[in-house]
Image (spheres, rainbow, N blue to C red):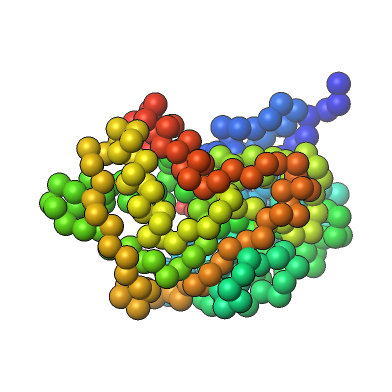
């Protein structure tokens, strides 16, 4: 029997971190680090963790993900999203390990109007996207090409954590009771990605020793309005809502936020799906799987 593959997971308390722990395949020795075990803003601590554990892979699922807050905390966003992957990669370069760096569709500006391919140049619009783009670049520069994999994803949600799906379930219930509509932005298009399908892609990337840049989202395309509408419909069908609220499409201009967001950030995942040997799951189906988890365990989002 071959020895277990040692994987050091960062951000273990996040949406993806929790999904990764729940789906860790056989043959993996998982060292799960939350913020208490490893502060990603501390580059020296990142280096020390790699030196101490000498993992075969670091799966860097931790990140500063507060897109709007990042506009007023650029130093912290840079330390966590760029400094940590760089430090982890530098330490892995010395120990002989590999890095799976999770990144985002927000490295693109959304102006091209058709899906982004992995090799395309990045052009982030805000502090969060810039810090993640820097993290990709610095990690790739610090490691040999065959030992670094960047996996970009989009619009992550799941049965736990802070995410659009859980927020919309709450708002649907509140607005339906008050007889008021729920206004949701309809002119930003991307693709929702369930944390369990993303976790499967991460584990497949490790098992295939993937390198370079991969794109992973669920299949299809949606606006936030489409996503909110589907959460209401499918949530009601699963008994998670008495009835959905009416959803009102609005524009980005109607709902100003501190950070600019790409208006079209679909990721072309075709090559990555082949490389990872994973079939596409349409986002509505993946959403229904997440809602089924909540139906089976209504407290899942509160645990
Ligand atoms: N969420 C999305 O829509 C989305 C979209 C595209 C790409 N991504 C990428 O996907 C990956 C996973 O994101 P996610 O959705 O799982 O995000 P998440 O739920 O916000 O989880 C991020 C985790 O990182 C941890 N973290 C933040 N700052 C830290 C620090 N200084 N030291 C240690 N841990 C720290 C957080 O800890 P606390 O819980 O203690 O804050 C949290 O557990 C990230 O690389 C993200 O950039 C996410």
Residue 171, horizontal then vertical, whole percent = 26, 51
* Image position of 184 (left or right of 217): left
Closer to the camera in the image, 9 or 49: 9
Image label count: 0
Residue 181, horizontal then vertical, whole percent = 21, 58
Q: Residue at x 75, y 68 (%)?
A: 119
Check the image and report above or below for 44 versus 158: below
Q: Residue at x 71, y 54 (%)?
A: 270
Q: Which quadrant of the structure image shows residue 281?
A: top right
Extreme residue in the left direction:
178
Q: Say which quadrant the C terminus sits in.
A: top left
* Image position of 252 (left or right of 116): left
Q: Say which quadrant the N terminus sits in.
A: top right
Check the image and report above or below for 268 versus 291: below
Q: Which quadrant of the structure image shows residue 63?
A: bottom right
Residue 26, horizontal then vertical, whole percent = 71, 26
Q: Residue at x 30, y 32 (%)?
A: 239
Q: Which quadrant of the structure image shows residue 212?
A: bottom right
* Image position of 193 (left or right of 241): right
Extreme residue in the top direction:
1
Q: Residue at x 38, y 48 (%)?
A: 230
Check the image and report above or below for 136 versus 109: above
Asked if residue 108 can be seen in this view, the reply is yes
Asked if residue 101 can be seen in this view, the reply is no
Residue 25, horizontal then vertical, whole percent = 68, 30
Closer to the camera in the image, 78 or 109: 109
């Amino acid at each position: 029997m071959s020895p277990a593959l040692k994987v050091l997971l960062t951000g273990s308390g996040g949406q993806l971190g929790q999904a990764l722990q729940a789906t860790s395949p056989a043959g993996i020795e998982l060292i799960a680090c939350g913020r208490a075990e490893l502060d990603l803003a501390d580059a020296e601590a990142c280096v020390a963790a790699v030196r101490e554990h000498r993992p075969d892979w670091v799966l860097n699922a931790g990140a500063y993900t507060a897109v709007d807050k990042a506009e007023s905390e650029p130093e912290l966003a840079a330390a966590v999203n760029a400094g940590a992957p760089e430090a982890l990669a530098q330490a892995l370069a010395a120990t002989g390990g590999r890095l799976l760096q999770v990144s985002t569709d927000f490295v693109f500006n959304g102006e091209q109007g058709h899906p982004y391919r992995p090799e395309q140049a990045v052009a982030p619009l805000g502090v969060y996207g810039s810090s993640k783009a820097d993290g990709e670049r610095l990690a790739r520069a610090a490691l040999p090409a065959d030992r670094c994999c960047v996996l970009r994803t989009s619009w992550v949600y799941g049965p736990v954590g802070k995410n659009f799906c859980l927020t919309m379930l709450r708002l649907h219930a509140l607005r339906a009771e008050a007889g008021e509509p729920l206004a949701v932005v309809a002119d930003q298009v991307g693709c929702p990605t369930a944390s369990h399908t993303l976790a499967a892609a991460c584990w497949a990337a490790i098992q295939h020793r993937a390198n370079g840049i991969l794109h992973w989202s669920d299949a299809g395309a949606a606006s936030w309005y489409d996503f909110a509408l589907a959460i209401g419909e499918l949530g009601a069908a699963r008994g998670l809502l008495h009835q959905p609220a009416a959803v009102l499409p609005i524009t980005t201009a109607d709902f100003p936020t501190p950070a600019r967001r790409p208006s079209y950030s679909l990721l072309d995942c075709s090559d990555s799906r082949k490389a990872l040997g994973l079939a596409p799951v349409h986002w509505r189906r993946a959403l229904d799987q997440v809602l089924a988890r909540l139906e089976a365990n209504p407290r899942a989002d509160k645990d």
